[in-house]
C-alpha cells in the first residue's frame, strides 16, 4: 500500500472528524439549556414517553441515549421507551453518516424514529418488561454526567467541549474512522469486496445485526463506510443502524444487565426483520 493512499485515507479521516466535532459541539450547545425535568412529567404518559425517547435516540451522539438510560434506571420511563431509544439511536456513527451521505442519513434517521416509536408502543402494549433498577444516584462520575445541565459558558468549554467532545469522543472517532478506511483500502487491493458481498446480502444483514449487540460505536463504522462507497446495499445499513445504539448501552449494562440483553434481543429481531423486508422489496 503506497504512502499516497495512506495520506488520502488520513485526509478523509480528518475531514470526517472535523465535521463530527462541529456537529457534536452544536448538539452540546443545544443540550446546554435542556435538562431531564420535562421528562419527569411524562411518567404517566406512555405514548409521550416512547415518542420523546425515540426523538432523543435519533439525536446524533450519545447524549440522548445516556439521558434515556438514566431515566429508565430511575423508573421514570417504560421499557418500551428504552427500546425505542435503542432502535432510533446510531451513536456517534450518525455524525459520520451525515458527513458521508447527508440526504440518505436524514431519511434513515427519520425512518428509525418512526420505527422506534411503533416498536416501543408494541413492546409496552404487549407488556414486555425487564427488571428495573431504582434509587440510583446521578453522580458526576457516571458516564451520563455529560448529559447534565451546565449553565455557564466556561463550564461548557471545559466540560462539554474539551473533556467530552475533544478528549473523549474525537480520538475514538478518528481512530475508528482512520482504521476502518485504511483496512478497507488495504483489503480492496486484494479482494473485490463488492463482488463478494453481491450475493450475500442476507448474511451481511444478520452479521450487521449481531455486531450491533456490541455496546460501542466503532464496529458499526465499517458498514457505514462500505455503504458510502457503494459496496453495501441499504438493507444492511438499516439492520446495522437499528441493532446498534453506540456506547449509551454501557451505562445500561453496568446497572441493569437483564434489561440490556432483552432490549438488544428485540433490536436484533427487528433489525433482521426490517433488513430482510427491505431486501425483498429491493430497496
Image (tube, rainbow, N blue to C red):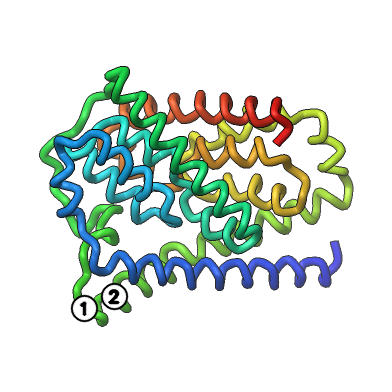
Expressed as whole percent of the image width and height from the top left, the position of residue 277 reads 63, 26
Q: Nearer the viewer, residue 124 or 83?
A: 124
Residue 46, quarter of picture: top left
- At numbered mark 1, what does the secondary structure look like: helix, strand or loop? loop
**Is the N terminus in the top left, top right, bottom left or bottom right quadrant?**
bottom right
Q: Residue at x 73, y 66 (%)?
A: 9
Vertical arrangement, residue 19 with respect to residue 240, above or below: below
Where residue 101 is drawn, which disc sits there?
Answer: none
- The residue identified by callout 2 is 156
- At numbered mark 2, what does the secondary structure look like: helix, strand or loop? helix
Q: Residue at x 25, y 53 (%)?
A: 142
Q: Does residue 152 appear to the left or right of 201 in the view shown?
A: left
- The residue identified by callout 1 is 152
Figure label count:
2
Q: Nearer the viewer, residue 162 or 228?
A: 228
**Is the C terminus in the top left, top right, bottom left or bottom right quadrant?**
top right
Crowding at mark 1 (Cα within 10 Å: few <14, some 14-19, many 20+): few
Expressed as whole percent of the image width and height from the top left, the position of residue 151 reads 19, 73
Crowding at mark 2 (Cα within 10 Å: few <14, some 14-19, many 20+): many
Vertical arrangement, residue 177 with respect to residue 235, above or below: below
Residue at the extreme bottom of the image, as rendered:
154
Callouts 1 and 2 close, C-beta under 8 Å: yes
Vertical arrangement, residue 203 with respect to residue 117, above or below: above
Q: Residue at x 62, y 71 (%)?
A: 14
Residue 203 shows up from this direction: no
Q: Residue at x 20, y 54 (%)?
A: 36
Expressed as whole percent of the image width and height from the top left, the position of residue 196 reads 83, 35
Q: Does residue 61 appear to the left or right of 78 in the view shown?
A: right
Residue at the extreme left of the image, as rendered:
135
Amino acid at each position: 500500500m503506497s504512502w499516497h493512499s495512506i495520506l488520502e485515507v488520513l485526509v478523509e479521516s480528518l475531514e470526517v472528524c472535523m465535521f463530527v466535532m462541529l456537529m457534536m459541539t452544536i448538539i452540546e450547545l443545544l443540550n446546554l439549556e435542556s435538562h431531564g425535568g420535562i421528562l419527569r412529567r411524562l411518567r404517566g404518559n406512555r405514548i409521550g414517553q416512547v415518542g420523546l425517547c425515540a426523538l432523543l435516540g435519533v439525536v446524533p451522539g450519545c447524549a440522548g441515549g445516556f439521558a434515556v438510560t438514566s431515566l429508565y434506571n430511575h423508573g421514570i420511563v417504560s421499557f418500551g421507551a428504552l427500546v425505542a431509544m435503542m432502535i432510533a439511536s446510531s451513536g456517534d456513527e450518525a455524525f459520520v453518516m451525515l458527513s458521508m451521505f447527508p440526504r440518505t442519513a436524514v431519511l434513515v434517521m427519520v425512518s428509525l424514529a418512526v420505527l422506534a416509536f411503533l416498536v416501543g408502543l408494541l413492546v409496552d402494549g404487549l407488556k414486555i418488561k425487564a427488571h428495573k433498577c431504582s434509587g440510583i444516584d446521578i453522580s458526576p462520575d457516571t458516564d451520563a454526567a455529560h448529559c447534565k445541565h451546565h449553565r455557564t459558558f466556561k463550564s461548557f468549554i471545559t466540560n462539554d467541549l474539551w473533556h467530552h467532545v475533544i478528549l473523549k469522543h474525537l480520538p475514538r472517532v478518528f481512530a475508528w474512522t482512520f482504521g476502518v478506511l485504511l483496512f478497507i483500502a488495504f483489503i480492496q487491493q486484494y479482494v473485490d469486496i463488492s463482488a463478494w458481498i453481491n450475493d450475500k446480502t442476507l448474511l451481511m444483514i444478520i452479521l450487521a445485526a449481531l455486531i450491533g449487540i456490541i455496546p460501542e460505536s466503532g464496529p458499526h463504522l465499517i458498514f457505514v463506510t462500505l455503504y458510502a462507497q457503494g459496496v453495501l446495499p441499504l438493507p444492511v445499513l438499516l439492520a446495522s443502524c437499528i441493532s446498534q445504539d453506540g456506547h449509551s448501552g454501557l451505562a445500561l449494562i453496568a446497572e441493569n444487565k437483564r434489561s440490556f440483553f432483552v432490549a438488544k434481543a428485540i433490536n436484533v429481531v427487528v433489525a433482521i426483520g426490517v433488513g430482510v423486508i427491505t431486501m425483498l422489496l429491493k430497496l
